[in-house]
Amino acid sequence: MTGHTFDIAIVGGGLAGGLIALAVTQARPDLTLRLIEAGAQPGGNHRWSWFASDLPAGGDALLAPFGKTAWNHGYDVSFPGHSRHLASRYCSLASEDFAATLARELPAGAILTGAEAASLDAGGVTLGDGRRIDARAVIDCRGFAPTASLSGGWQVFMGRHLRVSRPHGLTAPVIMDATVAQLGGYRFVYVLPLGERELFIEDTYYQDEPTLDHAALNARLDDYARTQGWDGDILGSETGVLPVITGGDFAAFQAEQRIEGVSVAGARGGFVHPLTSYTLPFAVATALAVTAEADLPGDQLATKLETMAREHWRAMGFYRLLGRMLFGAALPEERYRVFERFYRLSERLIERFYAGRSTMADRARVLAGKPPVPVSRAVAALTRPAPPLRAPEHKDYP
């Protein structure tokens, strides 16, 4: 398009917005776009990880330009009564590599950082400093907005990038080490061996409240590293509070986010795995879908993404049910038993679970047999209303 009007303006340079910008650039270099990010760089301070089996067709090609770490020979899990190695390929992408790739791959000037959006409308974006960016289509990717329309619990975490003083000896990621003390919710430590002397370790909790105690989590990461014999330098850290969605009124949630004629994508649009809080596979699928319809007028693209989000909500019902049982039926210190039992199931079933593509047979298998929680509590959890996903008092959203 000509002048100062762009084909697409994307507000929010996180995972969803960045991947849409990249996908459109790869497939439709004739289109003009702006990626508008309030922070100093796209991606913020975060790390995204995924199983290779999570990605839809076309996903590998979209992610190919990124400098990521991959473990081709699987990963480990460890629980008090069960440990296992699984062969699924695992990948991880750090936000600095995400930002560097977008800067390299997108057209010069396409990324606008340090730009807070004051308002969005069907014809463009008005920035906080009064500047106006006009666009045929506007896509809102500003992240999950806490809401009373959805219910559930929270995944709270603190991660730390370490350079240790001697080789750590790990050859595979530890996706869940739940042998640690269970403190008020399902707790596990997540460990990625990034190099011979580099590690990323993260202390994660499935808990009822969105409380992130920085001092406590820092101390627990210190203790875990000390127990493993890892001493060295801290290269970086991150924190986050993610929703674990177990129910709610999705139509009301969509109405809260809706700006007439503006598309909504990413977690803000509901494109998440409700139990694991994973977003990357769905961000990839959305980016590819937007690219396929990149010539649509903005209002038609908005309608298409709303419809996709409703279909995604319906498809994720099984995982919301499991989340209600996890939070409502299992005592906080016993929640690990749910995951311990799950990791005794077949590897392909586990892959489909994380990808959000569980078959009817998978669902029956997950629910079959002796449950890891009392049946009476499980039944009660399915009828008892869950707490709303209201905003926490701090600002630790990714």
Image (cartoon, rainbow, N blue to C red):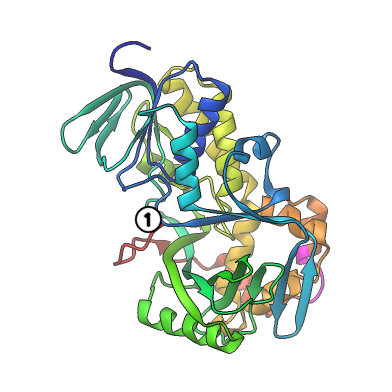
The residue positioned 49% from the left and 79% from the top of the image is 232
Q: Report x, y in % for residue 37.
A: 34, 41
Q: Residue furthest front?
A: 166
The residue positioned 64% from the left and 63% from the top of the image is 322
| Disc 1: CA contacts within 10 A as few (<14), some (14-19) or many (>=20) | some
The answer to whether residue 319 is left or right of residue 243 is right
Q: Report x, y in % for residue 143.
A: 40, 48
Residue identified by numbered label 1: 146
Q: Is residue 331 above or below residue 115?
A: below
Q: Which residues are magenta?
A: 366-370
Q: Nearer the viewer, residue 150 or 87?
A: 87
Q: Is residue 31 above or below residue 184?
A: above
- Residue 368 is one of the magenta-drawn residues: yes
In the picture, which quadrant includes the C terminus? Answer: bottom left
In the picture, which quadrant includes the N terminus? Answer: top left
The residue positioned 50% from the left and 72% from the top of the image is 162
- Residue 338 is one of the magenta-drawn residues: no
Tag 1, which secondary structure? loop
Q: Is residue 130 above or below residue 69?
A: above
Residue 57 sits in which quadrant? top right
